[in-house]
């Protein structure tokens, strides 16, 4: 009987020691500022960069209206251009867009000068042939990123990047004020896109 009592006392003492040691260790960690909390998962640098890439750097609302060409646009826009390749179509298109090949204008040339415009190079299409003295050039839309471009024009453009700025350029007869059915898209003053109906063509500058 005495042995059982002694064993019980020993077990009680050991239990008390273990609890005490545990409390002391926890208290020490709190004093040292090393108490362990549930770890939080921080986003990686790559994930943060990916999120940044989703949001355009310029989220300004598109400009819709009419304004004169600025000097940088004039410098880029004026010259002789050749139709290089078909890019694609708007989401909706008419028969005149000649889907899926597009109009037969590859290789044709357009002359765009400050005081003269000629699309007589479109030999297969009388409807697109114009020759204007003192033409009126205007910016009618400016889209500051890829998303706003799609919202305005309802079309995808090959190789258009998220942060590209696109200006829609209109050509009109200054004597009548009427615009012609030949339009252009200026991408970053670096690419010029021809718009015929709902068809897009890449233009390449002809070097003199």
Image: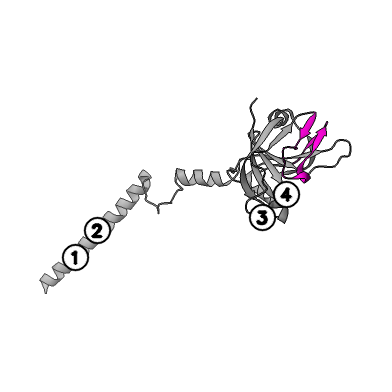
Compute the Cα span from label 4 to label 3: 12 Å
Of residues 135 and 64, the one nearer the viewer is: 135
Dot 3: element: loop
Label located before the other in sequence (4 or 2): 2
Residue annotated with mark 2: 18
Compute the Cα span from label 4 to label 1: 93 Å
> For residue 120, which quarter of the picture?
top right
Q: Quadrant of the C terminus?
A: top right
Compute the Cα span from label 1 to label 3: 82 Å
Dot 4: element: loop
Of residues 208 and 170, the one nearer the viewer is: 208
Dot 2: element: helix
Q: Which region shows up in magenta? A: 115-140
Q: Nearer the viewer, mark 4 or mark 1?
A: 4
Residue annotated with mark 4: 197
Residue annotated with mark 1: 11
């Amino acid at each position: 009987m005495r042995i059982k009592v002694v064993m019980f006392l020993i077990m009680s003492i050991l239990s008390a020691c273990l609890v005490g040691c545990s409390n002391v260790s926890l208290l020490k960690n709190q004093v040292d500022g090393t108490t362990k909390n549930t770890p939080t998962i921080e986003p990686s640098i790559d994930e943060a960069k990916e999120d940044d890439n989703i949001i355009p750097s310029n989220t300004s609302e598109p400009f819709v209206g009419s304004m004169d060409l600025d000097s940088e646009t004039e410098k880029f826009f004026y010259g002789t251009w050749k139709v290089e390749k078909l890019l694609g179509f708007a989401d909706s298109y008419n028969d005149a867009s000649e889907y899926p090949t597009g109009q037969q204008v590859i290789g044709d040339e357009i002359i765009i000068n400050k005081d003269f415009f000629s699309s007589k190079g479109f030999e297969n299409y009388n409807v697109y042939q114009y020759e204007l003295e003192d033409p009126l050039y205007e910016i009618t839309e400016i889209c500051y990123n890829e998303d706003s471009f799609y919202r305005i024009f309802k079309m995808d453009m090959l190789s258009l990047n998220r942060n590209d700025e696109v200006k829609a350029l209109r050509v009109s007869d200054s004597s009548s004020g009427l615009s012609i059915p030949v339009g252009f898209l200026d991408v970053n003053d670096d690419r010029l896109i021809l718009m015929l109906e709902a068809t897009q063509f890449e233009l390449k500058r002809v070097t003199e």
